[in-house]
Amino acid sequence: MAAILPAVPVSVTAVGTPVLTANNDFSDLREIKKQLLLIAGLTRERGLLHSSKWSAELAFSLPALPLAELQPPPPITEEDAQDMDAYTLAKSYFDVKEYDRAAHFLHGCNSKKAYFLYMYSRYLSGEKKKDDETVDSLGPLEKGQVKNEALRELRVELSKKHQARELDGFGLYLYGVVLRKLDLVKEAIDVFVEATHVLPLHWGAWLELCNLITDKEMLKLLSLPDTWMKEFFLAHIYTELQLIEEALQKYQTLIDVGFSKSSYIVSQIAVAYHNIRDIDKALSIFNELRKQDPYRIENMDTFSNLLYVRSMKSELSYLAHNLCEIDKYRVETCCVIGNYYSLRSQHEKAALYFQRALKLNPRYLGAWTLMGHEYMEMKNTSAAIQAYRHAIEVNKRDYRAWYGLGQTYEILKMPFYCLYYYRRAHQLRPNDSRMLVALGECYEKLNQLVEAKKCYWRAYAVGDVEKMALVKLAKLHEQLTESEQAAQCYVKYIQDIYSCGEIVEHLEESTAFRYLAQYYFKCKLWDEASACAQKCCAFNDTREEGKALLRQILQLRNQGETSTTEMPAPFYLPASLSANTTPTRRVSPLNLSSVTP
């Protein structure tokens, strides 16, 4: 009987490990689907459930294969057959999280699959014991030097196998995880890169590599396999590195080639828009995602952050109740409920739910950051600092944690400390005006006014979301008696707030008009001074000064004083100021200590 060869490029090494190769283009989506189905099965057999789920979801988004094209499972080797009984028994124990028991029955097995499950069971056993000790003994905010005791032994054994070149793609992945847990970052990166070359279809290795890359320059130095999986990796790492434009381009390309139905890609696009604070777009995409996949829990904590920022209480309440019905003991569910209570200003309850999330997963980044925000609201600065530091331990790229630490030390009146943390936040978000304004305020407190001016101007240049950078820059020029530069900043500020089309009152608008009225008065430009003084009359805090200035201008004009022509003003008020467009509603600038971006 003729052997039926699988359609996916699969070969078997001498020790029985499937070797999968992936093309570097998307021309044959059927071939890609076969590869995804195969790797989903291989990862599931080894207990790598998240990678299996990712592959299966991606395969589901592609058209179904006809029966004739479905591939048989990889062939079983002699070693697989010898270890089959032990593997089957151990896998059943592994699935119910009896890791020590699984490792006991796999001891001495020779097949690659059984050996991986043996080592992985020992690793997860150590992680489970570490988490139990963290939760039971110390509590989530006092997690100190609790370590996975199995790591060193695993490193020694895996290192020997690695030197003998006996590790397959899954073994390399586990070796990399162990090295990362031991903070051997450089070695871990090298091993993960090797794992992506040996087994490019395993998403877990790409994801672990993503967690270790700190900037674009580091990414460029990596020698990655030229496969279609690399495109998913690059889109993900661009999102993590806040290179949102590049990430969105990658995701659009993936949608165009045939992955338009992938819920993973849709959710990643929503997260990308969340990261650049395009809240309307992100909310719209998340709402569409909820319609397509109503029982999805991944990324719903990010969705709740958006609802929180928009103060959408009823929608956030509905989301919290809905997720509770689906799975109340998921980390994301606890974070959503925490956000709900935070929006209702019940900060103690909110912190309690974020702590509950951390009991479920002490390495969940979002919960640490959100808990830091809650402790800030409760004026518990020491607990906030601990929470933010834990967030940074989990992911050094979390700009919110660095920014939160800066805010905390600002409250403690420690400007040198907050300068350091704001700098780190700015490095991660170089085009975020909030980081630049915070840096400028810090430099100002340290009397480094030149640096402060640079920060404020840069914040304006990149798009000042709070519309405060120009006002702060103008006040700085005032302190330095640079009156012309101060006036220019105030004029730009007024032009900006009137050109945005929103009928809202900005807190410093009256300050700008008062300064400009006085500046034009000193320059003997009566028409401009009069226009600004009239605007001052529209505000309670400057009304009397405006009236007094108008009387002075009228008196000088009656005495025959004329506007000067010797001192030309290089800037003028926008024409819209002569119209009756006085704002009527007051809104506060964004307060990041209470907002979860």
Image (cartoon, rainbow, N blue to C red):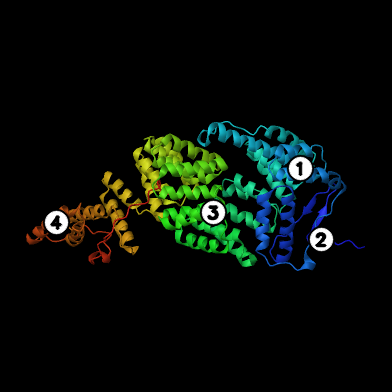
Horizontal arrangement in the rendering, residue 238 relative to residue 469 (left or right): right
Among the two numbered marks 2 and 1 on one chain, the one whose residue lies closer to the N terminus: 2
Among the two numbered marks 4 and 2 on one chain, the one whose residue lies closer to the N terminus: 2
Foreground mark, 4 or 3?
A: 3
Query: What residue did someone put label 3 on?
Result: 325
Residue at 58% from the left image edge and 48% from the top image edge: 217
Query: What residue did someone put label 2 on?
Result: 6
Residue type at mark 4?
A: Lys
Foreground mark, 2 or 1?
A: 1
Badge 4: few (under 14), some or many (20 or more) residues near its Cα, within 10 Å? Answer: some
Could you say where residue 143 lies in the image, as x and y percent from the top left? Answer: 54, 34
Among the two numbered marks 4 and 1 on one chain, the one whose residue lies closer to the N terminus: 1
Residue at 66% from the left image edge and 60% from the top image edge: 58
Residue at 32% from the left image edge and 55% from the top image edge: 587
Screen quadrant of the N terminus: bottom right
Task: Determine the CA span between mark 4 and mark 1.
Answer: 86 Å
Residue type at mark 3?
A: Glu
Residue projecting furthest to the front: 325
Say which element carries label 2: loop
Among the two numbered marks 3 and 1 on one chain, the one whose residue lies closer to the N terminus: 1
Badge 1: few (under 14), some or many (20 or more) residues near its Cα, within 10 Å? Answer: many
- Residue 90's tag is 1
Compared with 523, 347 (above or below) is: above
Residue type at mark 2?
A: Pro
Which of the two residues, 1 or 492, is positioned nearer the viewer here? 1
